[in-house]
Every structure is written in structure tokens, then in C-alpha cells.
Image (tube, rainbow, N blue to C red):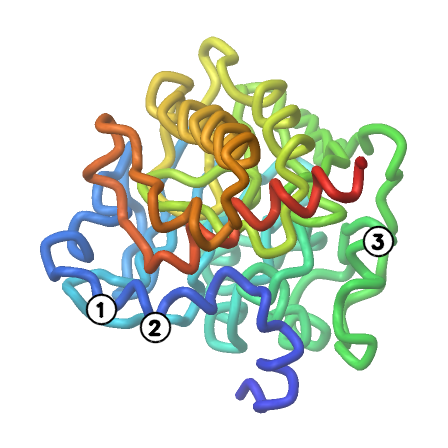
Amino acid sequence: MIDRRRLLAHGASCAAWLSTLALAPIGVRRAFAARPQGRVVAETDFARIERIADGVWAIVSTPLRNGGRHFTTTANGGIVAGRDGVLLIEAFYSADGAAWAIEQCRQLTGRTPDRIAVTHYHADHSLGLETMAGAGPGRTLLTPTTRALLDPEQSMPTLQPLDENGPTTLDLGGRIVRLHPRGGHTASDVTIELEEPTVVWCGDLVWNGMFPNFVDAAPSALLDHCRRILGRPKTHYVPGHGDTGDAAALAPYLGLLDDLAAAAERAHEAGLSPAEAATQYRLPESLQAWVRFSDDYFERAFRAWERERVGNG
């Protein structure tokens, strides 16, 4: 159970938009994260697991499946198994979500995950660490900055800090995973990148089918890292939210970031406030089918660009 104090402490979490998103038209809700890209090997109301390759699975959260409100996991994650170990990607939003993910690891690999990697501190990716402290992975992989941003009272499996100056290499036994420190969505983001097959778990640096949360964003860094990540040939991407896909499927998201940057520049030159810019902003025509939030989410994006401009001034 998530107590009110802790929920408020994680108010920046991307899960915070769900109450607004759930008010979207039912057709929009049913379309979100509804297109599996791999064979579905497990499915519930709140998530499904897609097989990407032998020993590699994507966990795709479906919080609005069938028009409902299923907050058990909320964010995407994954499972990677090698001869010597199993990595669970993300701790998810609730005790039930964390326990479900651990059980899926056992069923798919025959083993309890021995490591859990967390891409950033937001609650929909990290709050389940408390459950995992007593029932799952032996080590938590996250950056020191992410640990500092988490609730100091939050328990977790033994911390294995990640290098914030370069990638950390993890050998699971015949399967190499690299954890790259990045930034842009928060002050400390991590991408989890598998060599063979080439798969990138992007965390909330990348979204698909929905407008991203800019509440903690540094937009220039976000755009820079997304340009580095996206566009790689023969790569399977797992965004923080929404369906997985290849470079072509995620190209519209990069286009959205470019469009926001240009709109923020025009707004600044016109002397518009973030609120005024948000009122005038419209999604690119190619993204009209994406989930659209309240104007507050547009305003957050323009506020982030303005905050960065003032900070750099």
C-alpha cells in the first residue's frame, strides 16, 4: 500500500497524469499501448509481456486497457536472462506490480532476478523497490543521483551504484548489457542497452503515443540524448510508456521534441509566457492520434524550456 505522504513525495511521477488521462475518450484510451510488437507470453489488465528474443522480454504497461484504470505497474520495463543471471528492468509503481514482475521472471526464466535496474527516480518506475527488498533481486542498479532523489526512507535491495561518467557493463553470462548514464527527463536517467539482439530500454527519455511529462526536464539534454539513442538500425526500443517499436516507429517522438523546441523559441521571441505559449500550441498533424493531455502538460514543456533559457542566461 502506498501511503499518502510517499505518494505526495513522488508527485512528479509520470503516474500523476493517469487521473487526467483516464478522462480521455474511450477510443483513445483503448488505443493506447494496444499494439504488441512481439509474441505476448503473459497478459493482465495492467500489463503484458512481449518476447523480443530468447531470454529477452519487454514488459508493456497498459494502464487504460479496456477503458479502465489499472495503476499496478504503469511504466514499461523488461527482463533479460543470461546463463549466470537475470536482470529485471524497473521496479514499477506498486507492491503488487513489483511482486507480479518478480513472479513473471521466475515463470519465464526459472529463476528469481538477481538484479533490478531503475532508469530514474519517479515513483512509477521505483516505488516497488520496497517490495523487492524482501522478495526479489539481491542488488539495485541506479545512479547515486537517482538514489539521492528517492525518498530517503525508501528501502531497497542492496545498492550497486552506477558510474555517472560512463556506461556500466553487466555480463549476465553470454549476454552483455550496458547501463548508460544520461539526463534530460530528470537530473539522472539511465538507458539499459542490450548488445545482442540490439534492444534499448529508454526509460522516460522516450515516449510513444502520448505527450511526455516535462516537470523535471532539461529539454536540451533530453533532445540531445534522444538524438543519440533513436535512429539506430535493427534496434528494438522500449519507451518508458506506450508500445515498443523500431527507429521508424519512434521517429515521431523525436519530431515532437524538435517541434516543441521550435515552438518554444518562437514563443520566447514573441514575448509569450509559458501559459500563453501552451494555449496556442497544437500537436503536429502526424501526432493527432497521440494521447493528448490537458494544457497543463503543454505548459510544463514550455516552462521547462523557459527555465533552461533563464538558467543559461
Q: Residue furthest left?
A: 27
Give the residue type at disc 1.
Answer: Leu
Where is residue 236 drawn, in percent x and y?
45, 24
Q: Earlier in the sequence, mark 3 or mark 2?
A: 2
Are dots 2 and 1 in contact, CB under 8 Å? yes
Give the residue type at disc 3.
Answer: Thr
Give the residue type at disc 2.
Answer: Ser
Q: Residues within 10 Å of mark 2 (few under 14, many from 20)?
A: few
Quarter the C terminus occupies? top right
Q: Residues within 10 Å of mark 3 (few under 14, many from 20)?
A: some
As drawn, 6 above or below 79: below
Q: Residues within 10 Å of mark 1 (few under 14, many from 20)?
A: few
Q: Secondary structure at mark 3?
A: helix
Q: Residue at x 35, y 17 (%)?
A: 248
In 3D space, how far apart are the residues under numbered discs 3 and 1 (Cα atoms)? 34 Å
Q: Residue furthest front?
A: 271
Q: Which residue is mark 1?
A: 23
The tag on residue 19 is 2
Q: Which is nearer the eye, 184 or 279? A: 279
Front position among marks 3 and 1: 1
Where is residue 50 drawn, in percent x and y?
35, 41
Q: Quarter-wise, where is residue 285 in the image?
A: top left
In 3D space, how far apart are the residues under numbered discs 2 and 1 (Cα atoms)? 7 Å
In 3D space, how far apart are the residues under numbered discs 3 and 2 (Cα atoms)? 29 Å
Q: Which residue is mark 3?
A: 145
Q: Earlier in the sequence, mark 3 or mark 1?
A: 1
Q: Secondary structure at mark 1?
A: loop
Q: Residue at x 77, y 67 (%)?
A: 157
Name the side, left or right, on which 264 lies relative to 142: left
Front position among marks 3 and 2: 2
Q: Secondary structure at mark 2?
A: helix
Q: Which is nearer the eye, 207 or 20? A: 20
